Every structure is written in C-alpha cells, then in structure tokens.
Image: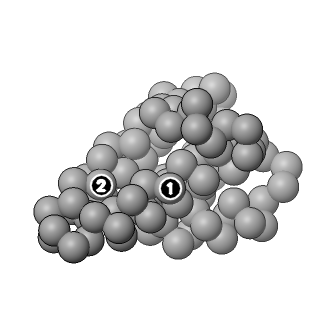
Amino acid sequence: MAEGKAESDKLIPVLSYVIWLVGLIVFLVEKEDKFKRYHALQATVLGIIGFILGITLIGPLLVWLYSLYLAYQVYTGADPRPLAKYIEKYV
C-alpha cells in the first residue's frame, strides 16, 4: 500500500512514529487518508505503551527503537501493520 505513495505522503506517518504526539494530532485531524490515520494511530498506541513502560527506563527506549524501525519501513515503501487486528476498526 505504501509503495505507491509520494514522499510527502509518507512524511507524516514517519514523523508519527518518531514523535507519537504528532501521531495523535494526525489521527484526530486527518479524516480522509486511511494510510495516514492507520499509521498515526499505531504510532500513538506504541507511544502510549512506551510511556506506560517508562517506569523501567529500558521499555520506552525499546518501543522508540521499534517505532523508528516502523518509520523506516514506511519510508522505504513497506506497510507494516503489527497492531492491525487491534486498531484497524478505529481507522
């Protein structure tokens, strides 16, 4: 799905993974583009998980590194959806 996207269309999902608050804003504002909404919601969920795991110090780092990996996949044209069965109905 991401392979046909223009570079500018991939930038918002990539930023959503790097800074999960961007993902939350995009999810709340964007109503048309399901690709952006999906990755924004997935990035937000991962950010919240990292925040909750913040007690251990290593948890947020691992979640953030995984988010960077997902951002790289979106940027290179892949369409990673590890949380699809949980969040697809909200997009």
Which quadrant of the figure has residue 3?
top right
Q: Which residue is mark 2?
A: 63
The residue lying at 34 percent from left, 63 percent from top is 50
Ranked by sequence position, the earlier of labels 1 and 2 is 1
Q: What's the residue at 84%, 55% (across, down)?
A: 31
Say if 22 sits above or below 34 in the image: below
Name the mark on residue 45: 1
Q: Is residue 6 visible?
A: no
Residue 41 visible in the shown view: yes
Asked whether disc 1 touches disc 2, contact meaning CB atoms under 8 Å apart, the reply is: no
Numbered circle sitting on residue 59: none
Residue located 53% across and 72% down the image: 21
Mark 1 to mark 2: distance in Å? Answer: 10 Å
**Neighbour class for label 2 at 10 Å: few (<14), some, many (≥20)?**
many
In the image, residue 30 sits, relative to residue 71, either above or below, namely below
Rendered location of residue 30, percent (x, y): 78, 59
> Disc 2 on helix, strand or loop?
helix
Q: Position of residue 35 (x, y in %)?
A: 68, 41
Quarter assignment of residue 26: bottom right
- What amino acid does circle 1 point to? Val
Kind of residue at disc 2: Val
- Tell me the crowding category of disc 1: few under 14, some 14 to 19, or many 20 or more residues within 10 angstroms, Cα based: some
Q: Residue at x 73, y 38 (%)?
A: 89
Front residue of this view, candidates 30 and 8: 30
Relative to residue 46, is residue 12 drawn left or right? right
Please, what secondary structure does the residue beneath circle 1 have?
Answer: helix
Q: Check the picture and name the quadrant holding the C terminus.
A: top right
Choose between 4 and 68: the one closer to the eye: 68
Q: Is residue 25 left or right of residue 80?
A: right
Quarter of the picture containing the N terminus is top right
In the rendered image, residue 71, in percent from the top left (x then y), is placed at 42, 47
Measured as percent of width and height from the top left, residue 69 is found at 32, 43
